[in-house]
Image: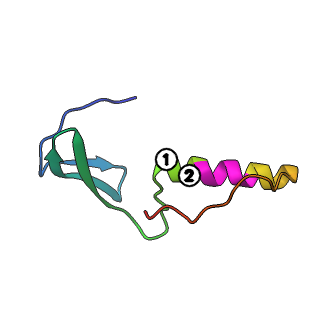
């Protein structure tokens, strides 16, 4: 894992088409802006994990897991 420090307004470039910018730092929270090609899917990790677990449960035929409304992205 690469660990670097960035200040508000500074950017990180990933490959040829992805830019991550520190938009705001407030208390213990950091807001990031991500610019990427449209075909590149970007997910919040906690949502990706939840969908993955639900898909695995469905593949096992386990329909007892509650399916609440999706979390806003």
Q: How many marks?
A: 2
Camera-side residue of 42 and 51: 51
Q: Identify the secondary structure beneath mark 2.
A: helix
Give the camera-side residue of 15 and 41.
Answer: 41
Q: Residue 54: within the magenta?
A: yes
Q: Which residue does the numbered mark 1 point to in the structure image?
A: 45
Provide the major secondary structure of the magenta segment. Answer: helix
Residue 24 at x, y percent in the picture: 16, 52
Q: Which residues are magenta?
A: 50-55
Q: Position of residue 60 (x, y in %)?
A: 86, 49
Label 2 with label 1: CB-CB less than 8 Å: yes
Q: Tell me which colouring the rendered structure shows.
A: rainbow
User: Foreground residue, 7 or 55?
Assistant: 55
Q: Where residue 56 is drawn, which disc sits there?
A: none
Q: Which residue shows up at 49% across the image and 68% down it?
A: 39
Viewed as shown, does residue 19 lie left or right of 58? left
Identify the element where label 1 is drawn: helix
Measured along the vertical axis of the image, is residue 24 above or below residue 29? below
Q: Is residue 30 left or right of residue 59?
A: left
Q: Residue furthest right?
A: 61
Separation of residues labelled 2 and 1 (CA atoms): 5 Å
Is 1 within the magenta? no
Assign the C terminus to one quadrant of the image: bottom left
Residue 15: x and y in percent read: 37, 50
Residue 55 on image: x %, y % = 73, 54
Seen in the picture, residue 49 relative to 35 is either above or below; the reply is: above
Left or right side of 17 for 70: right
Give me the residue at 56% from left, 52% from top.
48
Mark 2 burial class by Cα count in 10 Å: few <14, some 14-19, many 20+:
few
In the rendered image, which residue does mark 2 sit on?
48
């Amino acid at each position: 894992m690469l660990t670097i420090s960035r200040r508000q307004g500074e950017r990180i470039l990933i490959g040829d088409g992805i830019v991550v910018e520190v938009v705001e730092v407030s208390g213990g929270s950091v807001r990031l802006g991500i610019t990427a090609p449209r075909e590149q899917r970007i997910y919040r990790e906690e949502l990706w994990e939840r969908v993955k677990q639900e898909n695995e449960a469905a593949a096992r035929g386990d329909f007892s897991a509650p399916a609440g409304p999706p979390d806003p992205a």
